[in-house]
Amino acid sequence: MKKLTLIILSTIITYSFSFAQNEGAFRIARLQYEGGGDWYNGQTEEPNLLDFIKANTNMKVNDDFVSFNINSDAIFSYPFLFMTGHGNVAFTSDEVERLRKYLENGGFLYADDDYGMDASFRIEMKKIFPNKDLVELPFNYGLYHDLYDFPNGVPKIEKHNGKPPQGFGIFIKGRLAVYYTYESNPSDGWDDPDVHGFDKDKRLEALKFGTDIVIWALSN
Amino acid sequence: MNSQSNYFKEIITKLERLVKREYLFSAVLGAQISIIVGVATFAIFSLIEMIWHFPSIVRTVLFFLFLVIFGGAFAYLFLLKLLKYFHLFRNTDYFNTAKKAGKHFPDIKDDLVNAMQIVSEQNEGRIYSQDLIDASFQNIYNKTRETKFESIIDFSIVKKRLIYVAFALLVSSALFIMIPSIREASFRIINFNREFIAPPKFTFLVTPGDSEITKGENVSILVKVSGKIPPKVFLAIKEKDQTNFQNQQLYADSNGVFKYVMPAVRRPFKYYAMAEKIKSQEYSINVIDRPIIKTLDITIISPGYSKIAPVKQKDNGDITALHGSYVYLSISSTNALKNAYVEFDDSSQSKLVVDGFSANGRFIVNKDNNYKIILMDQNNNQNLSPISYNIKSLDDAYPTISILSPDKDVLLNNDNRLPLDVKISDDYGFTKLLLHYMLSSSKTEKPGKEYKSVEISINKSQTEQEVNYIWNLSSLNLSSDNIVTYYLEIFDNDNVSGPKSTKSPSYTIKVPSLNELLTKADKTQNESEQNLSKTLKEAKDLKQKMDDISQELKQDKKDISWQEKQKVQQAADQFKKLQDKINDVAKNLEKMQQNLQQNNLISKETLQKYMELQKLFDQIANDELKKAMEKLQDILQNMNRKQTQEAMENMKFNEEQFKNSIERTMNLLKKIQIEQKMDELVKRADQINKDQNQLSSETKNSSQLNAEQKNQLSKKQDEISQGLQDMSKQLDELSKKMNELKDMPKEQLAKLQDQFNQQQNSKTSQQASQDIKESNLQQAEQNQSQISKNMSQMKDQMQQLQQSMAQQNQMQNFKNMMKITNNILTLSKDQEQLQKQTENMNSNSSSFDKNAREQKEIQNNLDKVMREMTSLSQKSFSITPEMGKSLGDAQNEMKQSMQGMQNRNPNQSSNSQGKAMASLNEAAEMMKNSMESMMKGGGQGSGMMSLMQQLQQMSGQQMSLNNLTQMLQKSMSGNLTLQQQAELKRIAQQQEMLRKSLEQLNKEAQKSGEAKKIPGDLNDIANKMQEIVKNLNSDNINEKIVQQQEHILSRLLDAQRSINERDYENKRESIAGKDEARKSPAELNLSSEKDINKIKDELDKAAREGYKKDYENLIKKYYDSLQKGNIKN
């Protein structure tokens, strides 16, 4: 029953956002950033996740890979921004302003550390929200129990340094506006199977988790 | 008688002294007793009066009774004795006195009384002889002559009793002093004839009594009741103009004090306390109408450079502002003002302009301070207890600067550009960023003494920024070995205290000499070769070790021992270390190759081979190898002998491959080294030719030069001589390297060497140097010209040699590949034929042996082909590991086929033969494709080469364009001339053409799928080019455009470099994570954010409503406590 409710909810949400995007379907925008990190890596990630969402929910999605610079006005048409990479992230002060504006006005940013992004990402987030911290979400947080249940929080998809996976959030007026996964790397699990060589179960776990993030971002 | 009467008189006189002393003693004692009696009586009467508070009549009785008692005692005990002392009212009995004296003095005893008796009896007529009397008296007289009768009276008693008197006086005084009611009672006794009213049961102590307050102030009235506390206490208050007092019941606090607070008193009033009809004194409170600050508006205007918007504060006088800020005060008062001023803690004052009820003024924040606002109204009333406000002066911090890149001394690249990545920050902005530089070392010219400066364009208002500036050093005309020292200096925009600056550390840029670059490359190559060689040796040793371990593991035991496990582990670790070493070699070579490429010291052919070599390096440490190693590690955990042995065998196979790959890489590296050495010699010859031509033209014009200048020229010629000697050495080196390999054009090189030696170029150059010194310029020019000619010739010949060697190698490789391909195809046909035969056989066929022999022969032939291929792979990159793998697969299938025949299983055999044939065909197809590619003139990765070459060409064009733009910008003074406009249009056209080419290239790159990272970058570069074209077409040319062009160049070079970078990211290891149970993080507390906002709102409200500072603090503390959970509801 809970799942059915979520599916119906997700359908409504998607239709509402589809108008915002003027393209009739939900899309994820990849965030381009400076600093040297490979923002562009894994370009099959979003299309695969969106295909999975399409197959398992009633959401209408467009699985094209799209990416924008923060300075592009297009980002305001996308309720869900995704960023990942292995290296350094650097926002200029203009970009900091714009991203803050985007997030404060209802936008959602999901950042996934693909190894090596953590330190710079945290610094840049502090620039955007000097008075807010990335707080680790408890396992009973709603995101982990959306359509799919993750009783232990973020799943461990990539080994990285072998540390426990962690999910952090920044809240704006009680709404989760930024969600950040560390030592997990779910987005690698969304990539084509031959890219990382994960087994079927691991990929499925990552895709299910990605679906939960999308639904949570759109419904809260 | 005379004598008798004389003695008698004497005795009487002595007795009289005693009598008088007795009376005196009695009088003093009587006085003491009288005083004690008097004091005691009065005290007792006062106590009685205090208790009963008698009417006048009783007090009259008491008073007179006191007088009687005291007077009686005084008269009888003192006055009477005193009178007797003076012989008044006295009847002296000397006999008694004599008795007393006789008693006291034992010598006298009754003698004196007896003598006195005789005299007395004679006087009464008794007959005593006069002589007897005389004798008696004389006798007594003589006895007492020295005796003082009065000494029997002891006055020490008087002294002792004086203490009682004093005590009585002290106690009574204390009672009178300490107990007012006794005092009052005594007063009433003394004033016995007056009537006194009885005291009330209680009294009031009222504070503040009569007082003055400021209008609007609260008045707190305290009433203390002494005596019997009445059940109800009232405060009666009457304001001015009111006719009647209004009663207000008061309630006592825990201390028994009755308190009443009159809030915001605006009019004077009278008041008194009252209870049970007993009233306190009536008091008055007078209200003074002092001026009070009704509103306080503050505007802080920060210094303009800070760009801080004016800050307005309402009713909050505390100021935190940047040093130099203006603070504008605007006050409204409750009273019309006479004057007003701001008084600072350091006693300085700032006068405010008064206008009716308001006052305005300003002051400058120049230090931390405190201030008060003093108001005086028209009635000269001053505001009471003005608030002390705080001024916090904020200092403008120094700007910061750090050079992020390059953060060390560097060598200048061939493009003469140094990209600087600088981070600057300041609290309010900047004035300028300067790049200071100076030629600090040069072989040919004098180093500079002062730094020159270039201003770098920055966003002056952005307080934190990263500046990417590409410094074009072309205009400095630097030559080899020149060293430029530079640093950056950032200035902030503080125009109050003057702009402050911060300097970065100094770094140097060295222009590397050709020799330096090439020697460095040589060194890297040699080291790489040595490392590879060492690694190969270690790999061979490891192979031996692995063989031994493998042999040991074959023992028939179930588990492996701990020692065996250790050995396997050590072998695996060693293998891992070898792989790491190979990776290090690959990285070093890649770096070297990039360096050579950046300095244009490597031909495209050699570069291509380096790229192929990098691929080989990648394949050495391939995934299969890593997986085999991981598998071995996993199996080692189980300690299972059989599985470990299998894994070890697998590892051995991989190690063998690893060893062979190193061997191949080494041989190919040697070959590349030779080709690179030839590139180097071409470059050296070309460089010497250019340098010599340049020097020749300088020599031609040197007739007017002085000795020192000629000396400089001579030095330059000496450098050429050195270059020629280096070249000779490098030729020897090349010859040596060629001798290590087969199929090298050694003879042609030997001829070139002979020719070079015969030309005696170095000697000719030395002669030219000498000629310059001696001013034999004509001779010098001839020698120089000869050297130029020789070098030009040498360059051409070396290039020809390179070309012919490449052609020869290619032909040889092609021929060998063709031969191998034919052999593979023949083997394939043989295999096909054999398969057809096998297909028709049944398990009872007699042809199994014959077919097995034929299969064996095909297999043997395949071994030969594989050996040929391995041999060819040592010389050519055209043989790929995939080809080897296909042949390896064919070989395995052939073995399977043989096995099938031995088992008399024609199906198995035929099936394997089919697979072997397919693998052979696959290998032949790959060989064919590779040959076709060679025929087209490209090897493996030619697409990337082409992309890189095109990018290289574009970088060159962009560099020329940049230089043109910069020259044009420098030549500008104000508006562009028509000629300059035309030039600018040409640059814009060329930039547009370059943009279109880049777009085309991008499309091609996208189609080909080469270099995944490139397309996005190229697209971005093309967009930026479009921006520049737009600006140039609008005749817009400035430092920003110049920098944008430099950035485009930099990005083109980066793109070019990234093509041949080993794509580390793509090869990054992906290992699936394992889920592990862990505790959930703490619950979220999202309410804290709301709490903070709530506190803020409350405080804002408090500030708006004009609470006093201490109340504001109290609110803050309260909410802080609430947030911390210290206060519980």
Image: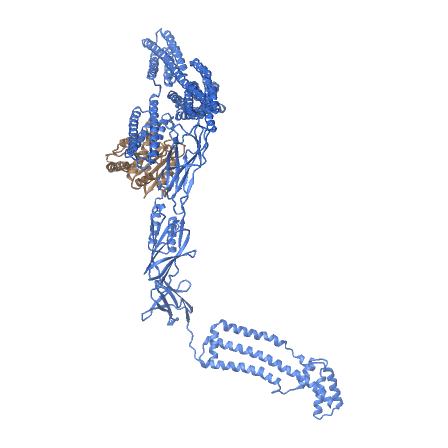
Chain colours: A brown, B blue
The answer to whether residue B421 is left or right of residue B997 is right
The answer to whether residue B583 is left or right of residue B245 is right
Nearer to me, B619 or B419? B419
Residue B77, placed above or below residue B598: below
Image quadrant where one finds the N terminus of chain B = bottom right
Dividing the picture into quadrants, the one containing residue B28 is bottom right
Residue B353, placed above or below residue B616: below
Q: Residue at x 59, y 75 (%)?
A: B162
Asked if one can make out residue B646 in the rendered structure from this viewpoint, the answer is no
Asked if one can make out residue B829 in the rendered structure from this viewpoint, the answer is yes
Residue B29 at x, y = what percent?
60, 79
Residue B913 at x, y = what percent?
34, 12
Dividing the picture into quadrants, the one containing residue B1041 is top left
**Which residue of the protein is positioned furthest toward the bottom in this rendering?**
B125
Residue B442, placed above or below residue A108: above
Residue B874, placed above or below residue B954: above
Residue B151 at x, y = what percent?
67, 79
Q: Residue at x 45, y 77 (%)?
A: B53
Nearer to me, B639 or B498? B498
Dividing the picture into quadrants, the one containing residue B274 is bottom left
